[in-house]
Amino acid sequence: MATDKVEREIVIGAPRERVWAVLTEPGHVAQWFGDLVEIDLRPGGRAVFGWTEYGSHEARIERVEPPGFFSYRWAHQAGDPVAGGTSTLVEFTLEPDGSGTRLRVVETGFAALAGSAEDRSTAVKENTTGWLNELGELKEYAQRAAA
Amino acid sequence: MTAAGRPGGARADEILAALADPTRRQLLSELAARGSGTATRLAQQLPITRQAVVKHLAVLSRAGLVSSHRDGREVHYAPQPDGLAATAQWLAALAAEWDVRLREIKRLAED
């Protein structure tokens, strides 16, 4: 069954241990996910991803299994606590790929978010899978039917 | 852009929640294929009661995915594609943000 999932992956020309460090060490993370980053790297540990412009997002570390798996839940809105209706789950899987690493990220739980976010339009690429395809198909049906 | 990271909309959340149920997705597909329908007709097409159909249609209606109008005794439901388009764009934007982050992770790791 389709879920409310965003799933992306990339192949990186570096070993898993190196990618693991970039994913989990605050100094590295601050270069790709926020400006001010705190990470207490253990299950149940607190993390904070802060953006000077947008505020700080709380997160809770879920699983820490170096160098293959890392996950956390993070609050959808700056200032919110991490809870069922306020956060999404982000899971990273690192698999060896030749001498490099295949890094996959899956973010889930959007449907469970209690509505509150403001509309913010962003540049859009029609290139994700799962839900998006299904939504696209439904939309096509609907538009055909409406025509 | 990152925490712009949370482009969204109350609508998008509600729409995803409404669509999380396979019966509701089926109802919506059914409506989309036919242009419109009544609860009675939809109940004939799916293995659920008319009462269950009405409940599911109410959820879809609150999320803005179907509209309804009364014609005599019957309420006719029609699909509303705009909400789907907005939700698809929302998820595509989230995916595009992960693409940006993953490329940055790659650059840092390969440095």
Image: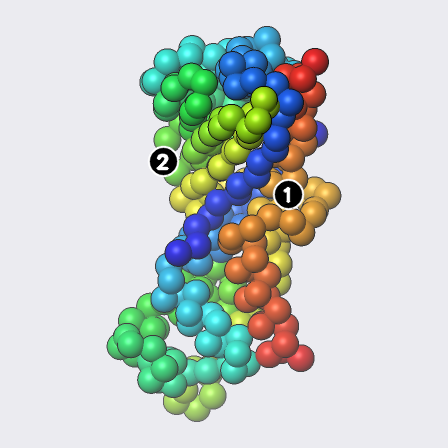
| A117 or B106, nearer to the observer | B106
Tell me the subunit letter for badge 2. Answer: A
Q: Residue at x 59, y 23 (%)?
A: A100
Q: Secondary structure at mark 2?
A: loop
- A126 relative position to A73: left or right: right
Q: Residue at x 42, y 83 (%)?
A: B38
Q: Residue at x 33, y 68 (%)?
A: B55
Residue behind mark 1: B93
Q: What residue occupies the far bottom of the structure in this picture?
A: B72
| A100 or B63, nearer to the observer | A100
In the image, is residue B106 above or below residue A113?
Answer: above
- B83 relative position to B41: left or right: right
**Can see residue A57?**
yes
Q: Residues within 10 Å of mark 1 (few under 14, many from 20)?
A: many
Q: Amino acid at mark 1?
A: Ala
Please tell me the numbered disc located at residue A84. Answer: 2
Q: Amino acid at mark 2?
A: Gly
Residue B4, how many percent across, how many down? 65, 32
Q: What residue occupies the far right of the structure in this picture?
A: A123
Q: Quadrant of the N terminus of chain B?
A: top right
The image quadrant of residue A146 is: bottom right
Q: Quadrant of the C terminus of chain B?
A: top right
